[in-house]
Amino acid sequence: MTQSRALGSRLARPLGVVLMLGAAIGACGSGSSDAAPVSPSPAGGDTTARASTLDGKLSAPAGIAITYFAKGVGGVRFMALSPDGVVYASQPGSGRVVRLPDANKDGIADSVEVVVSGLAQPHGLAFHKGALYVAATDGVVRVALGPDGRATGSPVYVNRFSGGGGHWTRTIVFGADSAMYVAVGSTCNLCVEQSSDRAAVLRFNEDGSGKRVYASGLRNAVGLAVEPTTGALWASQNERDNLTPEHEDLPPEEINILTDGGDYGWPYCYGDRVPNPEYNDAARCARTIAPAAKLQAHSAPLGMSFLARATRLPAAYRSDLLVAYHGSWNRDTPTGAKVVRVHVAGGKPGEVEDFITGWQRPDGSRWGRPVDVLVAADGAVLVSDDQGGAIYRVVQSAP
């Protein structure tokens, strides 16, 4: 049984109703048990009590509340936090970046304001030394911002790389060394790329110059995050499709801890350096780096965030990582469309468990698909949803 209630609505604001955590306990979210995941199974490793939230739409651990931070943000993808604590988000389909201020700090965005438009599929966002950097599909642009948080002039490309192709998204992060890192996906499902800047994470100087390949063999590394205790760069990896004869349950998706010059195997290998049958090159695979964690096959892990600053969640979460699973597209039994918690100890990923589920209905259809995770200035966690056109706010509920 699910019980929830509305706290109120903003009649003058289009961003919707704030909803409280339900009091009743519900069942854990379901999912398939795919091959070779980190133990316990990421499909259902969480054995803690769960409750419904967001007016019964979602399921989360008991004591966690989910509300709408913003509605009506169609196709919203990746997010970043400005130096003054305002949330910025990309909308690649409309070629723009928006800001979502919350001036009265009530946990609901006051408005959706266009910062810059006319970009080529802008995706990843990062702030560095007061400027906004946007990873468009063909290069990174620098956007100077005025006092109102909007662009003061035309965006300027600080570098270029291969654009478009089968995987068009680009993600950017500034590392512990202040260098710029950009993830560029492959052009294909499985092929030997003609350009070295595909299926790779690139490193640039902080001004965008000095392009080189930092890590290779990464079919589509969409999420990038810096582990706060080690300073290491972590990447979520979307692996190949159509692996015979078990294309539904192999290969596992991955979390990789990147090293300078590291080769992570694609297209020659998957998982624990297993040769892909199209190449069957065991000797080459033996020289590659195995994933730090194996995730549910075809779950499409995208954005992720470490929780060291997530003070609005229980203290037990602070060392861990949240990863948004966008969800499968070619499984007979759909999977994903949820947020998982990855336990981290000693700078390494451990067990994986469901954190937020419910975007996927029992019949496999979905009303939303989570994309990115961000820790907000007040210590709450935000989750973007490109299908639902919303950003959710996640906190520990009041006793």
Image (cartoon, helix red, strand yellow):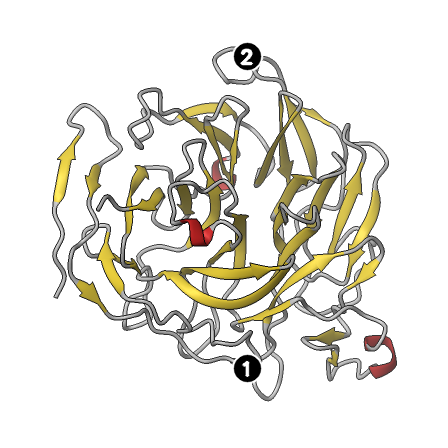
Q: Is residue 184 above or below residue 111?
A: below
Dividing the picture into quadrants, the one containing residue 29 is bottom left
Disc with the residue nearer the chain's start (2 vs 1): 1
Tell me the kind of residue under disc 2.
Answer: Gly
- Mark 1 packing: few (<14 Cα in 10 Å), some, or many (20+)? some
Q: Is residue 377 above or below residue 310?
A: above
Mark 2, mark 1: which one is toward the viewer?
Answer: 1
Q: CA distance from mark 2 to mark 1?
A: 50 Å
Q: Residue at x 45, y 24 (%)?
A: 114
- Residue receiving disc 1: 35
Task: Give the left or right position of residue 51, taking residue 384 as reference.
Answer: left
Q: Is residue 37 visible?
A: yes
Place of residue 320 in the rendered image (x, y in percent of width and height, measured from the top left): 52, 55
- Residue receiving disc 2: 146
Task: Give the left or right position of residue 91, taking residue 258 as reference.
Answer: left
Task: Give the left or right position of residue 231, taking residue 193 as reference.
Answer: left
Place of residue 68 in the rendered image (x, y in percent of width and height, measured from the top left): 29, 41
Dividing the picture into quadrants, the one containing residue 392 is top left
